[in-house]
Amino acid sequence: MAVSSKSDSNHNNELHEKLKWSFSCAVDKSDFLRQSEDFKTIEGWYVQGKKTSDNITNSSLASGEMIKELLNHVYPHYTNIIMEKTDMNIKLAEGSMQSDFDIGIVTMKPYVEFIKIVDGEPMPPAKFTFQLDIRTYISIFKAVNKATEYIELKKLGIELEILLLHMPYFYLSEPVKLTTKSFEIQNIRLPRKRQY
């Protein structure tokens, strides 16, 4: 289990923001998703259920919720994978080490559910399922010894592909590619996994 504090979140903030940007590109800039009847149905629920100000469109509420839920599913899990794989490399090298390595491709299948409430009763959920293929490489990490609480990464490189697998009402015969993003984060500090 990873223990985080406010200072940990500051170091991971850039990773969080880059993932948020990637999800925003996948949701907000995908003509296929935004123009689908499934997405328009969810937008309609927001029109019926939420009062919005003039400067917030109903579609931004639906897409904002989708992006937020994707981040909630992916960010903590992905951060833990990075910490576990890096910690494993440190243990294999018996402590102090500087190295470059590739985590490989991590595949996640997060989903977002929207539930409409009618007369106080929940309707069956409208579920969007995504697939994320994330290739991660780490450049020169440093952990001084096994007691060090942090791992310092000189560079974290990420190649991310986001696919749409399932929609609530429209059948997809094959996954739809929403976006591909590549980015690097310099000088990131992550807490090590605690050993109990």
Image (cartoon, helix red, strand yellow):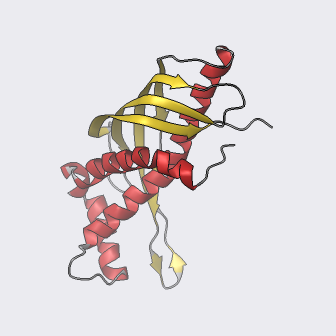
Q: Position of residue 129 (x, y in %)?
A: 42, 48
What residue occupies the far front of the structure in this picture?
144
User: Which residue appears farthest toward the right when viewing the image?
Assistant: 196
Residue 166 appears in view: no
State left or right for residue 9 relative to residue 185: right
Q: Is residue 135 above or below residue 22?
A: above
The residue located at (63%, 27%) in the rendering is 87
* Above or below 98: residue 165: below
Foreground of the two, 171 or 147: 147
Give the quadrant of the C terminus.
top right
Q: Quadrant of residue 194?
A: top right
Picture quadrant of residue 162: top left
Which residue ends up furthest to the top in the rendered image? 93
Give the quadrant of the N terminus: top right
Q: Position of residue 191 (x, y in %)?
A: 60, 40
Q: Nearer the viewer, residue 154 or 24?
A: 154
Residue at left offset 53%, top offset 40%: 79
The residue lying at 29 percent from left, 78 percent from top is 47
Q: Residue at x 51, y 38 (%)?
A: 189
Left or right of 131 on screen, residue 172: left
Viewer-proximal residue among 178 and 128 = 178
User: Is residue 97 found left or right of 24 in the rendered image?
Assistant: right
> Does residue 22 sit above or below 40 in this rendering?
above
Residue 165 spot, x, y in % from top left? 38, 42
Q: Is residue 87 visible?
A: yes
Q: How many marks?
A: 0
Q: Which residue is at the front of the view, 6 or 117?
A: 6
Percent position of residue 182, x then y? 30, 33
